[in-house]
Amino acid sequence: MKITKASIEAASIRIAPYIHNTPIMTCKSINALYGLDLYFKCENFQKIGAFKIRGGMNASLQLTKEQLEKGVATHSSGNHAQALAFAAKMLGIKAYIVMPESSPQVKVNAVKGYGAEVIMCEPNQQAREETLQNIVNKTGATFVHPYDNDDVIEGQATCVKELIEEVPNLDIIITPVGGGGLLSGTCLGAHFFKPSLQVFAGEPEGAADAVLSFKSGNVEKAPFVNTIADGLLTTLSERTLAIIKEHVTDIILVTEEEIKAALRLIYERMKIVVEPSCVVPFAAALKNPEIFKGKKVGVILTGGNVDLSKFGEWFSPQN
């Protein structure tokens, strides 16, 4: 399948009855503090609390009658799990979700709340994939990959389409990057709906695989994994890397301290609930104001499914 301008437009119409066209917020105090002009696309206010419903819903709506009868399955630490569980509930089909034992409890509870069957596994990629394969073999359910799937990427592209329609004079868009589904969709959406728009990504130093892959041209693994941005722990796929290599201007790394500072700033200044993964692109913009000054910059705030029990740990005096 080839993703085109027409296919993204069709996806936008297809998923519209099931999602929100989320608000775009600005913050005068943050702009004044850093000399920036930021436009936040607030996917934390999206159905299921994250952008992932766009891709999950778009993929589910294109399944055949035979596939729908057997249900859907995936592995995810959180937001894609919720997206697919919600989509399955909307369509009245079964969902089987493999989640690592390290998944935030708030996300596990939400997936169960949408009626999905949750199967826990050890927190590593091999365990996730093997557990999922066993379920697919047993049930015949269709595996909907969190990001290595054109229907999912096409759905994620609808987010930047909405942002461009509302703020047509944007110069730059910046997103987080984990597996690259949102970033790939953003690249293609920008390419088709505003070709002059530069695309940047933010990535945690504690899960820095995408920046290595971007530089080498091959899918790389992170040298180490240790970050509070639990939604960005996956590696790129060949599919997402190919799109990112072609369209992304740069990937900016941020430290854990910078992520926490950005998280605190949004809570204190904007008074909205966001999760750590979500503020990584904002942290990247704050770290490199010289790149973004004098430009209209769109920042996709990807989700707000935050584990509130972690706040003491993140914001204690020693942290």
Image (cartoon, rainbow, N blue to C red):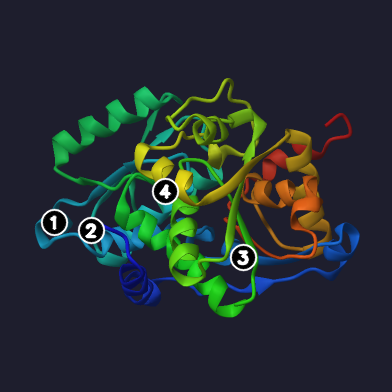
- Name the disc covering residue 93, or none: 2
Q: What amino acid type is highlighted by mark number 1? A: Glu
Q: How far separated are the C-alphas under marks 1 and 2?
A: 7 Å
Q: How far separated are the C-alphas under marks 3 and 2?
A: 29 Å
Q: How far separated are the C-alphas under marks 4 and 3?
A: 24 Å
- Residue 283 screen position, x and y as percent: 73, 47
Q: How far separated are the C-alphas under marks 2 and 4?
A: 32 Å
Q: What amino acid type is highlighted by mark number 2? A: Ile
For mark 4, what is the residue? 243
Looking at marks 4 and 3 on the same chain, the residue that comes earlier in the sequence is marked by: 3
Q: How far separated are the C-alphas under marks 4 and 1?
A: 33 Å
Residue 2, quarter of the rendered image: bottom left
Q: How far separated are the C-alphas under marks 1 and 3?
A: 34 Å
For mark 1, what is the residue? 69
Helix, strand or loop at mark 1: helix
Q: Residue at x 36, y 60 (%)?
A: 154
Helix, strand or loop at mark 4: helix
Discs 1, 2 touching: Cβ within 8 Å: yes
The answer to whether one can see residue 290 in this image is yes
Depicted 6 relative to depicted 173: above or below: below
- The one nearer the camera, 44 or 170, is 170
Q: What amino acid type is highlighted by mark number 3? A: Cys
Looking at marks 1 and 2 on the same chain, the residue that comes earlier in the sequence is marked by: 1
- Residue 262 screen position, x and y as percent: 77, 48
Q: Residue furthest left?
A: 66
Q: What amino acid type is highlighted by mark number 4? A: Ile
Q: Nearer the viewer, mark 4 or mark 1?
A: 4
- Name the disc covering residue 42, or none: 3
Helix, strand or loop at mark 2: loop
Q: Nearer the viewer, mark 2 or mark 4?
A: 4
